[in-house]
Image (cartoon, rainbow, N blue to C red):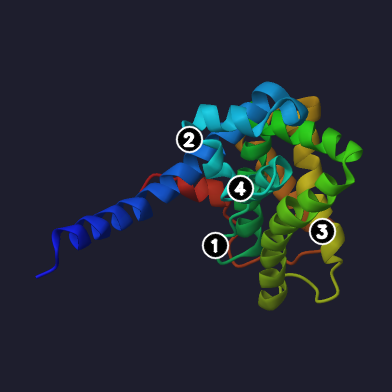
Amino acid sequence: MPRKAEIEQRRRAAGAAVLRPRVSLAIQHATLKELARAGYRGMSMESVARRAGVGKAALYRRWPSKRAMIVALIADWGAEAAETPDTGALEGDIEVFLSATLKWFADPLNSGIFLDLVAEAKRDPKLKAMLYSGLRERRRAAAEKILQRGITRGELPGDVDVQLALDLMAAPLFWRAVVTQGDTSGPYIRTMTRAFLRAIDATPGHSATSAIEREQTPI
């Protein structure tokens, strides 16, 4: 029979395994809130720890500095809007991706943090390099999967300029949601999807039905 001390040790270990993801999530939420409140320069590890309800040691066990913590958490945060579900056709894939990206940009918390980090990156070359490899590259890699599926299906020419296409996928949405703050409803996304497909010389897929329309169609 295991001794009482061994049982208690196992219970503590199991409890720690459950607690760690909760602590990490609390830290991520606290970091985003502090970035929105104080900006990159104004926030501190102390303020994040206080908001998250943890000690500073919990932060420093995970990241060596404020910059490293923010870049790691921002990469996860930005990647949440970069899911690449396979709808079976390039048009559906693009529409779902653009819709999720636009929703992300249209959130005041997200856009405020994003603009602050872009401005700060101009003054901090190390932050710029880390954001590029963390946030930007993860999002572009996810979007590239969509284009590669289109090439495999024969909906895109094999010599399509992938890097230009990736720029076209994000830039108009950022301009619309953050700069001009224009209408971003379903019709806009459908129009943008078709404009994008024409711009990259895509061949229509098997289904011309909008992915959003399919979701909204009653069973």
Residue type at the position of mark 2: Val
Residue type at the position of mark 1: Thr
Above or below, 207 relative to 64? below
Of circles 1 and 3, the one toward us is: 3
Q: Earlier in the sequence, mark 1 or mark 3?
A: 1
Q: Earlier in the sequence, mark 1 or mark 4?
A: 4
CA gap between label 2 and label 4 equals 28 Å
Of circles 2 and 3, the one toward us is: 2
Quarter placement of the N terminus: bottom left
Residue type at the position of mark 3: Ala
**On the picture, is 81 further left or further right than 12?**
right
Label 4: which secondary element: loop
Label 3: which secondary element: helix
User: x%, y% of residue 165?
Assistant: 82, 58
Question: Mark 4 and mark 1 in contact (Cβ < 8 Å)?
Answer: no
Q: Which mark is residue 11?
A: none
CA gap between label 1 and label 4 equals 16 Å
**Residue position for label 2:** 54
Q: Going 63% across and 39% down the picture, which residue do you hit? A: 104
CA gap between label 4 and label 3 equals 18 Å
**Residue position for label 1:** 87
**Residue position for label 3:** 165
CA gap between label 2 and label 1 equals 42 Å
User: x%, y% of residue 59?
Assistant: 57, 43
